[in-house]
Image (spheres, rainbow, N blue to C red):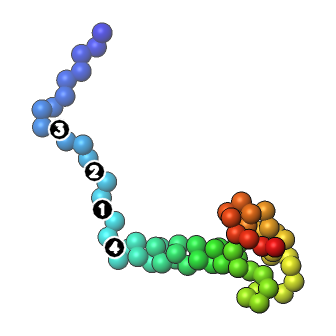
Amino acid sequence: MSDFTFAPGARPVSPPAIPLKEALPWVILGGLVLLIAIYFVGAEEGATALVRGTVVHEFLHDGRHLLGFPCH
């Protein structure tokens, strides 16, 4: 067997904190991407459509049903 000895004052090293100024643009970008994704999955059809035709609707059709959005 091996004997391990630890220094009595050893403390775990924590990762450095991320300043809010550096994280805020990424949080905003992530929020906008999420809102755009929710729009296209949940509301891109009919009167609110940004894209003509049914291409987006048909591409996201099964995802709508999986997430509980009605589309018929």
Q: Nearer the viewer, residue 64 or 70?
A: 70
Kindly identify the amino acid type of the residue bearing the numbered disc 3. Answer: Ala
Count the numbered circles shown: 4
Q: Earlier in the sequence, mark 3 or mark 4?
A: 3
Marks 4/2: CA distance? 18 Å
Rendering coords of residue 67 (x, y %)? 67, 63
Residue that protrudes farthest toward the top in the picture: 1
Kindly identify the amino acid type of the residue bearing the numbered disc 2. Answer: Ser
Rendering coords of residue 32 (x, y %)? 55, 79
Tag nearer the camera, 3 or 4: 4
> In this picture, is 3 found above or below 59?
above
- In the picture of the structure, the residue carrying the numbered disc 1 is 17
Asked whether the residues under the numbered discs 2 and 3 touch, taking CB atoms below 8 Å apart as contact, a structural biologist would say no
Marks 1/3: CA distance? 20 Å
Quarter where residue 65 is shown: bottom right
Residue 14: which disc?
A: 2
Q: Earlier in the sequence, mark 1 or mark 3?
A: 3
